[in-house]
Amino acid sequence: MEITLTHYLVLAGLVFLTGMVGFVVRRNALVMLMCIELMLCAVNIVFAAFSRLHGDAGGHVFVLMNFAVAASEAAIGLAILVEIYRRRRTVNVDDLKTLME
Amino acid sequence: MEGLLFWFCGSLLLLGGVMMVVQRSAVVSALWLVFAFLSAAGIFAVLGGTFLAVMQVLVYAGAIMVLFLFVIMMLQGPVMDGERRLMHPALWPLIAAPPAAVLIMLAGFLRGDRMVGFAGAPAPGFGSVVQVATLLLGRYLLAFELISIILLVALIGALAVGRGERKLPWK
Amino acid sequence: MDILTALLQGLPGFGGMSDQGLFITGAAVMATLMFTVMALCAIVFTWMERKVAGFIQSRYGPMRTGRWHGWAQAVADMLKILGKEDIIPAEADKGLFVFAPLVVLLGSLLAWVAVPWAPGFVAADLDLGLFFIFAASSMVVIGILMAGWASNNKWALYGAARGAAQMVSYEIPLALATIPVIMHVGSLNTQDIVIAQQGGIWHWFILRDPFLFVAFWMYFIASIAETNRGPFDMPETESELVAGYHTEYTGMRFAFFFLAEYANLFLVSLIAVFVFLGGWWSPIPGLDFAPALTFVIKGILMVFLNMWVRWTLPRVRVDQLMYLCWKVMIPVTLLCIVGSGILMITSGAVG
């Protein structure tokens, strides 16, 4: 069977879904951040697939931008988590509910 | 050939993603995510983006995931207390419902007549470093420069947040 | 690869093969060749390392095994390592423990694919050659972190954390130092980089302009740190951490780390040779009768320089290591890029 754009989109959808479910199910803030990275990766696949469809490498440029955004997000997110861990001795999101009470 | 590579890399990517979510240990999760990102690099290569594929390995597997692993190893033991037990069974359908709906929607797309094929093989030089660089420093120059500001802000932000209680040199 | 497939076609019995069959056979031959070279260089370089260390410290080094200057000592050591008991600690994460040495070895093996040994003789003639080498060798860091974590030993974990921090940091000046050369060549292909240096020692990139000369030494310092060798051997400081991330490893698995370490040493030396030191071209124009031999000899000289540094300088502290990388080497390499670019424009090399 020939591989079409739809195949790539469905694959990206499934990967995004995995990341989304993981984000909801996991309680470890570090793993939740990793799930966000996985969702960003799914978005990148869509960019690359449409880039191939139109024969225009503009999509690749946006994937590169996405890499930079993902790197910044990981750097800041991890810095915040390290700081939270220093103060509260946990990165479990169930224990971090000061604003809720 | 393209089909074979797509199924191979795609299934490995999904396997990596699912294993990341399922594994209790954060370190093992992160290693499965590295695996998923390497498979995603394979998908980029199948799509003609060789430069992207190498970038994916260099940036994700070589830098971002190393940062993650580093922080996980610094902060905690293999499995957190909160993740030893399963979630409350009453919550399971609530979590499963939206993905199931999306899956059914996606299945609708896979009917033969609705598929959008690619128009032949990509042009020679598509996705090469020269083409991407020309676009990056031409049509998308402003975005390229703005990204550098985002990275700078992230750098300073991470330093400011991670500094902790230590005094700043000028205080 | 092309030369190899052409050669195979000429052999009796291979003439009737399909293109794909030829490609696969060629790839298999190339992979075997690469692995043999890697294993050989580990053996030769351990002997060389001990002899160089002995010479620098005014002693003999191995002298007995194999009569002539103890040449068989490294072979004997290898046999001893392979004969040792394979131990997996009871508290270790078994899957990761077994897998980690393979990842380290894979990272350093993959990078060898794009090394240009001689004109047309390269395992994979990639457009992204140099970039691919850096990406592939960044996998080594993941393997080191895996090894340190799976060992379930605090010294191993400290060693792995130090190693990862050091390698991720020094990858940046390592890659930045090669950028002026890429600007001169206008291509990342490893063959193109060497071809651009034809015409004697004055055309090698190290002597093209002053900024490239500085960039070469920056590359050299970063490459020492990248291979975790002294004076930057923080991951395995014997006096602080027992042996770093491979403390718990024995037998064959330890041999993998050992092999990867020396393969990496030779790899970074070969990169220095083909990026800055003219690759397979001899210093005197017109004397290029044995390109691959010239290339390997230059690589061995670079390895010697590496060993000389290791056995001469004292080990630095971790904070000094990071200071050197982020506050000295990265600014200097960035300056090299800008300076080299300005020189290119003023000399009219680019429009």
Image: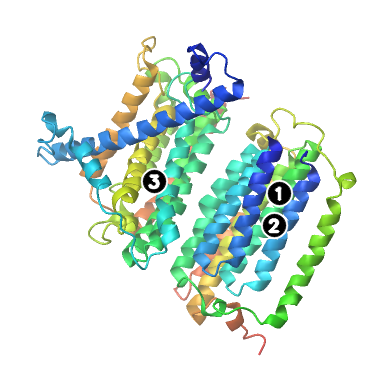
Q: Which mark is residue A45?
A: 1
Which of discs 3 and 1 lies nearer the camera? The answer is 1
**Residue B147 seen by the camera:** no
Q: If you read the primary sequence from the N terminus, does the residue marked by circle 2 or circle 1 appear first?
A: 2
Q: Up-down: is A55 above or below C228? A: above
Q: Determine whether the residue tagged by mark 3 lies in a helix, strand or loop.
A: helix
C64 vs C6, left or right, is: left
Which of discs 2 and 1 lies nearer the camera? The answer is 2
Badge 2 and badge 3 both on one subunit: no
Real-space Cα distance between discs 3 and 1? 32 Å
Q: What residue does disc 3 label?
A: C226
Q: Amino acid at mark 2?
A: Val
Residue reaching furthest to the front: C13
Residue reaching furthest to the top: C286
- Measuring from the top left, give residue B151's x and y in whole percent: 60, 55
- Which colour assignment does the render follow? rainbow
C150 vs C45, left or right, is: right
Depth check: A16 or C162 in front?
A: A16
Q: Amino acid at mark 3?
A: Glu
Q: Which mark is residue A15?
A: 2
Mark 3 falls within which chain?
C
Real-space Cα distance between discs 2 and 1? 10 Å
Q: Determine whether the residue tagged by mark 2 lies in a helix, strand or loop.
A: helix
Mark 2 falls within which chain?
A
In which quadrant is the C terminus of chain C drawn? top right
**Residue C227 seen by the camera:** yes
A26 vs C122, left or right, is: right
Q: Determine whether the residue tagged by mark 1 lies in a helix, strand or loop.
A: helix
Disc 2 + disc 1, Cβ < 8 Å: yes
Which of discs 2 and 3 lies nearer the camera? The answer is 2
Mark 1 falls within which chain?
A
